[in-house]
Image (spheres, helix red, strand yellow):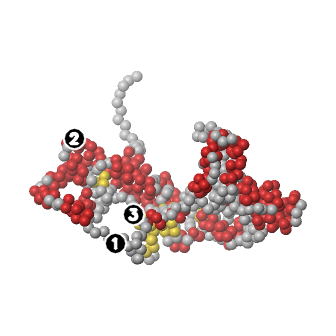
Amino acid sequence: MEIKQQLRLSQQLVMTPQLQQAIRLLQLSRLELIDEIRKELDANPVLADDDIDPRMRAKGTEAPTEMPIIGVTGEERIERLEDRQRAADSPTSQGDEKKAQEIDWEQFLENRTQQQALPANRGGFEEMPPIEASLTKQQSLVDHLKWQLQLSDFNEDERRFAELVLGNLDDNGFLDLKGIERDNGEKIPDLSIEDLAEAAGLDPEDAPEVLRIMQEWDPVGVCSRDLRECLRVQADVFNCDELELAIIDKHLHNLEKHNYQAIARDLKVPVEEVYEAVKEIQKLESRPARNFSETDEKSIAITPDVYVVKDGDKFTVTDNDRGVQRLYINEQLTKNLLKDPNAKDFIGEKLRNAQWLIRAIEQRRKTIIRVTECIVDKQRDFFEKGDAFLKPMILRDVAETVGMHESTISRVTTNKYVHTPQGLFELKYFFNSSIRRTGEEDIASESVKQSIKKIIEGEDKSNPLSDQAIVEILAKNDGIQIARRTVAKYREMLGILASSKRKKLF
């Protein structure tokens, strides 16, 4: 046993706070980046943007592209700011400041108040409504049902029960009372309408009647517990005949499989009558919330991070900095704080943090542009001709070209969007696995999906193509070698039903 000292030289990767901040900013989406910048502006008094930068207010000039104090040490930055402070205290600067102070601001504001307002009438109208009065928002299903609840004659207990029912509706408008499993593994048991009635202080015997009244609200069939109950409520309200009611009650599974012969045999009616009954049943709504949505898809807008524009024979990649604040150093506030000798350490730390943040944002912008340029170079045929010419590409292909790690490419392409001549796409869209083709180079899986979609769109609806038939068509027309189960997987990813459920007899 002895105590001794050793000198050892080694290399290791240290995750400094600056590196952690750069990695975190790299994977943020555009909206998250804007929110992060706003938080930093609130937390760091040294930072300023275009709206609050004193230099921009005083001079009215455009913001410089580079920080005048970036690239030097903290001591040099403080010394430069002190030199600027001494220059500002010179007689010439003091004379200019004195002239500015001689402006009679009270008189200026008084003159502004006495100015005549512009006439409000335009184009013959006495007064135009504000723009807010012209904007509309799509109403959600719950809001629509709450409006009907206010018009109902329910008592307080029934109203509380109805509110609990509305709070348990799923995206399709059905009453979902199934239990859920919590993070700790605890399983909450399934509920019933009687349980909701007890929680609302309503007699459980009255719960089915109140629920039935709600199911007849607009849209008819809402608040149903399953598809059969939804169709049955609509059938009762719209006075469907006995055969249609019997099909809904007993043969919904045969109706889904188009097994009309089995329905006719069981109900002992001609198959022609079953056809006519099914035509009427198909007019009923299987998803009451179809015309309602929690989010208005028309108002959802995605702002691209980069633009790909074709200029002659070349594609140019430019970043979209609109809406993202450009950060600078708030020199005026820094000068005022430097007057206090005790604030030097505080200002030096804030200046370093501001420099790291600005550099990280700039590095993020350059990395996104660099990766996008690599994608454009490898997927040039796609940008010129469309989806059918998308080539297989993985993260490693881009990582090796730009000299970065695959995890960095993954962070860059997540939640980042590019506007191209072919439309708006997420950068992740261009990474696809390869599918073999006979006699030609491999094709991207996304192109195969689009080919399957086009084949199904052009099929005979009365005799839809099976997955095996699609496999044969792809092999014959495009030379694509693909298994039947792969076609089924891609079809499900596209939201397309199987051939037995796509068949239309009427």
Please state which of the two labelled residues, at mark 1 or mark 3, is closer to the viewer: 1
Task: Judge by depth and name the residue closer to the eye, 390 or 289.
Answer: 289
Task: Judge by depth and name the residue closer to the eye, 103 or 263.
Answer: 103
The C terminus, quarter of image = bottom right
In space, the residues marked 1 and 3 are separated at their CA atoms by: 34 Å
Point out residue 45 in the picture as x, y percentages from the top left corner: 30, 49
Give the labeled residue for mark 1.
119
Which of the 4 quarters of the picture holds residue 480?
A: bottom right
Q: Which residue is drawn at the image coordinates 76% and 62% (left, top)? A: 239
Identify residue type, mark 2: Asn
Task: Judge by depth and name the residue closer to the eye, 459 or 22.
Answer: 459
- Residue 401 image label: none
Please state which of the two labelled residues, at mark 2 or mark 1, is closer to the viewer: 1
Q: Name the side, left or right, on which 135 lies relative to 107.
A: right
Give yes or no for contact between labels 2 and 1 (Cβ–Cβ under 8 Å). no
- Residue 342 image label: 2
Q: Which residue is drawn at the image coordinates 71% and 47% (left, top)? A: 208
Identify residue type, mark 3: Arg
Give yes or no for contact between labels 3 and 2 (Cβ–Cβ under 8 Å). no
Q: Is residue 377 visible?
A: no
Give the labeled residue for mark 3.
322
